[in-house]
Every structure is written in C-alpha cells, then in structure tokens.
Image (cartoon, rainbow, N blue to C red):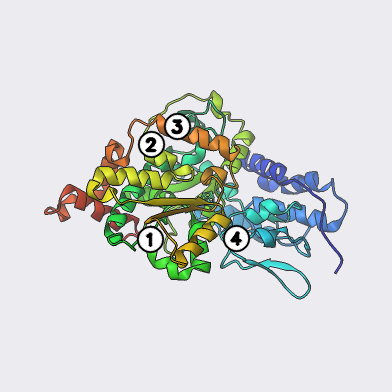
C-alpha cells in the first residue's frame, strides 16, 4: 500500500489555544467552524483537513468523526451536557490510513497492532495513554482527548465547588517565580474554588505504604512493589508480569487519594487533577477508582487555558500556604517515593527501617529489565519503585520544563518544606482527624488508628 501520511503539522498547540479561548469566552459553538477554517485553510488535501477537524474534536473532548466538519447537533448536546457529567474517557486516536510505524515501536505495552492492509489500531482496553506513541509520531496522527472544554463549562456554570489538585511536579513548570501561592491565585481567578497540593495526599499515601511494607515484608525473600504513583508501571506489570501482581502494594495514587479525601469531606465538590501525565486520564476512569477525580488536565493544557484567559500566574499575588512535607513534594522525581517511605518508616516504625532496602527505576526499558530480574530471582532489594517516564513525573509528556530542570525545581521546593516527613506534618493529622471516626476504634493506639483509617480510605476498592 502506498504511504499516505499527512505532513508534519505541529498544529495541536494552536488548536488547543483556539478551542480554549473560544470556550473561555463562551463562544465555542458560534466559532467552531471559524476555528476549523482558520486552521484548515493552510491545507488543501481532504485527508489533512479531516485530520484538523478531528484534532479540534479531540480538543473539545469528542470522538473523531472523519469529516471536515467539526461538530453536528448531537455533538453539541453532548458537549453542552458534559459540564455536569464525569469526565469522558480519554483515548489516543490514530489517524485513518496512517502508515507510520514509530507509534508501534514506542508503545511500552504493545497495544498498537496492524491489520492485513497495514492500518494501525490501538487496543483501547490495554492502552494507558502514556503518550509515548504520540510523542514519537511526527505527523500529529496520535493525540489524547482533552477535557478542558467541559471543565471550562463547569467553571463558568459555577454550580459546584471545584478543587484543583496540583501534582508535585508543578514546581517551576509555570516559571521560576511561580510559587504554589501564585499558581493558587491564578487558579482561583480562573474560577476554581480552591487549590490543593497533591503532595499533601502523597504524604498520606507514604504513611500507608510504610504500613504496607511493615505488613508484607517480613522475611528475607519478601518484597513490596509500590503502586502509588505510576499507572503505566502498574499496567506494565499487569500486562507482561501478571505473576508479580501479588507483590503490589494496595494503595491508591496520591491523585486518587486527593479526590477521595476532598469528596469524603465535601461530597458535592468536583476535583480536577493537574499534572504532567496523560495516563492519569485513564487512571481516573478505572472501575475501582472512578468517581474520585472528575477531570484531568496536563500542565500544557492548563498553560494554554491560562494564556487563553490572559491570566499570568507570575503576576498573581503569592498567598502560599505550605502544607506538604519534603517527602510528599519529592514524589515528582525518580526515587522520591522510596526516599519518602524510607524516612517515614524510620519515624513510624524505626525497628523496621533497618532492613528497608529500596531500588528505583525509570523509563520503560529499565522498568522491564528490573521486572525480568525479579522474575529470574536476581532481586537484591525489598521495596521497588518504578516510574515509566525518565526522571519520573518531571519527565511526563504534559510537562513544560526539561526533566533535569524539573527535578532541580522539585528538589528545591522539597528542601523548603516546613516538615521533613508526613509524620511531622500537622496537616496530615488534621486530615486524619477529619476522616477518622475515632470513636469506633477507642481501644487502638495512635499508630493502629492511623493504619486503619488509611486502609479504609485509600485501598484501591471504592470506600464504603
Ligand atoms: Fe505519568 Fe509520572 Fe508515570 Fe510518567 S512517571 S506515566 S508522568 S505517573
């Protein structure tokens, strides 16, 4: 079959900006065709014009429809209703008739296959939208579905309290001078009711992981695989190393923890996770986790919305209210989870910290190699941290900074934390007290109560 690839377009940032601007100004329906024509007029061939229309649909959170028109009346209804509905499932989409091959070789989970005519397709049940294929595709043929149009609708409707849960990797992403306080002010101006740092909920998860280690790693050959951060790492194990699943710690991610805790305390609230990760869009929709997070935005998407709304976080007032410990803040870089859990174990159950022996890997090839080594009995550690992106979440596909710079900013921000571990963070106890229902466990010690509350709220199965 003849090659049928469109040119190297690089139009996604412009599409996101135009769609965000029109949505922010409440003009998306009126201007949808104008946006389409504005972007399509650079291209004469029908296939590329269809691709542009499909990219606009994906930016609006709709499925591609392989037409040169952007939306029809049914889409309009769906789009109007999405502001009050849970987030649409996001999936990467492959442009029809594409004959490029980079996506297949970059998919860590082997979810992209070809039919007898050479047409590539994605197994949507296996895909975790980590975006490595999209980054590898120079034709803009792969993209993830954005959720910011229904989110902007929700913010404009002003019917719910909407929380932004901002990932620990945010440090420095919006400019060196943009502190948590400035980012919070910018988000409030955008219409959010409040911003929380996901790192505070990482503090809760760190304590839980320390308890899980204590529970599961007793003998010389025992080990625990941390589950808490990276959905791609977990999917890799699920797909290719299912025999190791039994060693995964039963903890939700800090993102899910933030949504669960906020909604436990304010059931009508909506929670939006903002981070560098595209795979979180799928994680938020997993059956045992669904409901905690309503929308997921990448840093790149948030930067686009802020630009469209002419809000510059650097110029906003700094009303920082530090809440997370060093341990929670460094989750964003490789080795952060292990370091946080190790230090927490020392404070919480010192006798068990002595033999804590972590190993960390990042990048799919190194993650795969380590898992093969475990299978081959070559493991020389008892706490295993894997991050799919090189450098950890600071290397995520929706980042704004190079990973090395992101790591340096995260380390600086971590070192400035008022508390070193979650055990020393008063905010952690404040949340536990609110979640606690201490009256139903009067005979327990403080540590046992903490472990019980965290197991009730932060195990993967939905809370009762
Ligand atoms: Fe997402 Fe972080 Fe995993 Fe990358 S390392 S896939 S950004 S959770």
Q: Which residue is mark 3?
A: 413
Q: CA distance from mark 4 to mark 3?
A: 31 Å
Is 66 on the left or on the right of 453, as rendered? right
Q: Residue 53, how many percent across, how many down?
A: 75, 54
Mark-to-mark CA distance, 4 and 1: 24 Å
- In front: 33, or 19? 19
How far, Cα to Cα, is label 2 from label 1? 25 Å
| Mark seen at residue 108 | 4
- Residue at numbered disc 2: 326
In terms of image quadrants, where is residue 419? Answer: top left
> Considering only order in the chain, which callout, 1 or 2, is on the residue closer to the N terminus?
2
Q: Is residue 249 left or right of residue 44?
A: left
Instruction: Report how far apart the C-alphas of labels 2 and 4 lie in the structure.
Output: 31 Å
Q: Identify the mark nearer the N-term, 4 or 3.
A: 4
Query: Is 320 placed above or below 142 here?
Result: above
* Mark 2 burial class by Cα count in 10 Å: few <14, some 14-19, many 20+: many
């Amino acid at each position: 079959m003849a090659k049928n690839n469109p040119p190297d377009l690089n139009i996604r940032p412009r599409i996101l900006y135009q769609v965000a601007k029109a949505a922010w100004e409440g003009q998306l329906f009126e201007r949808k065709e104008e946006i389409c024509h504005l972007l399509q007029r650079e291209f004469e061939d029908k296939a590329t014009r269809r691709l542009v229309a499909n990219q606009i649909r994906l930016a609006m959170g709709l499925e591609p429809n392989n037409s040169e028109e952007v939306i029809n009346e049914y889409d309009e209804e769906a789009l109007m209703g999405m502001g009050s509905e849970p987030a649409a499932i996001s999936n990467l989409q492959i442009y029809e008739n594409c004959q490029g091959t980079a996506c297949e070789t970059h998919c860590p989970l082997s979810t992209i296959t070809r039919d007898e005519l050479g047409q590539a397709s994605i197994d949507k049940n296996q895909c975790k939208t980590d975006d490595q294929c999209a980054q590898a595709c120079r034709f803009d043929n792969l993209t993830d579905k954005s959720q910011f149009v229904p989110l902007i609708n929700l913010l404009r409707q002003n019917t719910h309290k909407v929380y932004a849960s901002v990932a620990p990797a945010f440090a420095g992403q919006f400019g060196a001078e943009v502190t948590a306080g400035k980012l919070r002010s910018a988000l409030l101006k955008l219409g959010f009711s409040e911003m929380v740092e996901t790192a505070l909920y990482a503090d809760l998860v760190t304590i839980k992981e320390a308890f899980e280690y204590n529970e599961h790693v007793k003998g010389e050959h025992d080990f625990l695989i941390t589950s808490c951060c990276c959905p791609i790492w977990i999917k890799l194990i699920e797909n290719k190393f299912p025999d190791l699943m039994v060693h995964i710690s039963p903890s939700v991610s800090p993102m899910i923890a933030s949504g669960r805790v906020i909604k436990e305390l304010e059931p009508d609230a909506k929670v939006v996770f903002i981070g560098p990760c595209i795979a979180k869009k799928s994680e938020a929709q997993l059956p045992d986790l669904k409901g905690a997070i309503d929308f997921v935005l990448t840093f790149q998407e948030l930067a686009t919305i802020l630009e469209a709304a002419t809000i510059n976080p650097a110029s906003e007032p700094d009303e920082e209210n530090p809440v997370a410990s060093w341990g929670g803040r460094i989750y964003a870089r490789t080795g952060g989870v292990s370091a946080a859990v190790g230090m927490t174990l020392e404070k919480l159950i010192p006798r068990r910290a002595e033999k804590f022996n972590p190993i960390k890997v990042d990048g799919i090839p190194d993650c795969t190699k380590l898992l093969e080594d475990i299978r081959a009995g070559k493991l020389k550690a008892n706490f295993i941290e894997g991050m799919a992106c090189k450098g950890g979440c600071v290397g995520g596909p929706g980042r704004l900074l190079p990973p090395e710079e992101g790591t340096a900013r995260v380390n600086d921000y971590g070192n400035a934390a008022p508390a070193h571990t979650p055990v020393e963070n008063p905010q952690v106890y404040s949340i536990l007290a609110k979640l606690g229902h201490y009256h139903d466990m009067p005979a327990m010690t403080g540590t046992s109560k903490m472990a019980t509350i965290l197991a009730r709220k932060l195990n993967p199965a939905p809370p009762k």
